[in-house]
Amino acid sequence: MPLVSMRQLLDEAAKGGYGVGAFNVNDMEQIQAIMMAAKETKSPVIVQASRGARQFAEDLYLFKLIQAAAELNPEIPIAMHQDHGNSFETCKSAILLGYTSVMMDGSLKEDGKTPSTFDENVEVTKKVVDYAHERGVTVEGEIGVLGGVEDGHGAGGSGLDHITDPDQAVEFAERTGVDALAIAIGTSHGAYKFTKKPDGSVLKMDVLMAIHKRLPNTHLVMHGSSSVPKDLQDVINQYGGKLKETWGVPVEEIQLGIRNGVRKINVDTDNRLAITGAIRKVLWETPEKFDPRDYMKPAREAMKKVVALRMTQFGQAGHAGDYSPIAITEIAKGYKDGSLTTRPLVAAK
Ligand code: 13P
């Protein structure tokens, strides 16, 4: 199956009332782990690469690996997404490579660190939407600013520093026409999100619900959505690691989000934890080993287990065969004739 438009994948998820995990990748083993999980659970899936990942793996290696994944798994709809694009040029380069979706994170300036103004965000995001939609490529925007830093991208600080204002979310969706919208509701990238199990004072599910009510046609995206399970932390610490006690986003909160318009759920940290724990265990228990396959194989298996579990919990499991891919050129026509518009005012007419 060719790579699928993320818009199609998310529209299908909305119809089916489920969410789709978007898993970050840097290398072959992570891509294989995701595909093993997708095959086992029969799940459509979003694979995403940050700027850091594209640099680490080199664009062509990474993209050819994704193409191999699509070729080897023709029954699985796969969307390839640029995570946290920092500029028009970053998004354009992903589109020219063949990514079927890009995130223009205009909530930060091009340095990927400094919060931008609302108008700056609208301007750069709209420019990406115009370019991408003409080519049938999906666009995710961000309004509000997430906490923490991932792969060098992020404003740092707490997830509560720049919570999304629902009025601004509506205006942003109207002015940009994004397909999907990342919102800040208290989550942050990385392992250290919350100092105890989060409640409504730090994880603003009420804000998410308010936005969904006003933007029913825009797919909502939860970033920083690793659950940071204690068992994965424990494995790392049992074998010489030094993670401090921490809490992630409970799966039941994500499921509440999915019932309220969340269609894309970004997960990276949980997979990093699973991989690191598995590698540590092998090296700790059998220090005489030096063949990378001795630890990469269990690492890949550990990530596959986490991804398969999330696919089941998010509800995407079992939906791989629900639809056939619409050609990207057809999707481009839908943007042009207005049938795919998500703009709240236009769509309401
Ligand atoms: P986590 O660090 O919670 O896995 O979030 C990943 C993410 O949001 C990627 O954009």
Image (cartoon, rainbow, N blue to C red):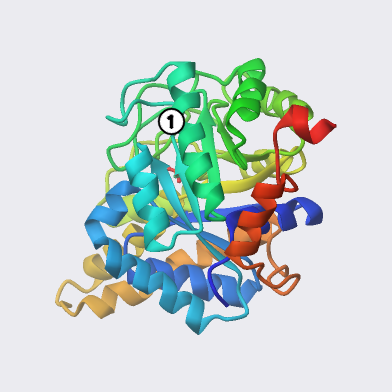
x and y, in percent, of residue 146 in the image = 46, 28
Count of numbered circles in the view: 1
Residue linked to disc 1 = 124
Q: Residue lying furthest right in this view? A: 349
Is 267 situated left or right of 199 in this image? left
Identified at 80% across, 54% down, the residue is: 15
Which quadrant does the N terminus fall into? Answer: bottom right
Q: Is residue 27 left or right of residue 11?
A: left
Q: Amino acid at mark 1?
A: Val
Where residue 182 appears, as percent x and y from the top left, is 55, 35
- Note whether residue 273 is visible: no
- The residue positioned 64% from the left and 72% from the top of the image is 41
Q: Is residue 220 left or right of residue 261?
A: left
- What quarter of the picture does the C terminus occupy? top right
The reply to whether the residue tagged 1 has its Cβ within 8 angstroms of ligand 1 is no
Q: Position of residue 287 (x, y in %)?
A: 17, 71
Label 1 Cα crowd, 10 Å radius (few <14 / some 14-19 / many 20+): many
At a point 46% along the width and 35% down the height, the residue shown is 127
Q: Determine the image quadrant of residue 314.
A: bottom right
Q: Quadrant of residue 62?
A: bottom left
- In the structure shown, which secondary structural element does the residue marked by tag 1 occupy? helix
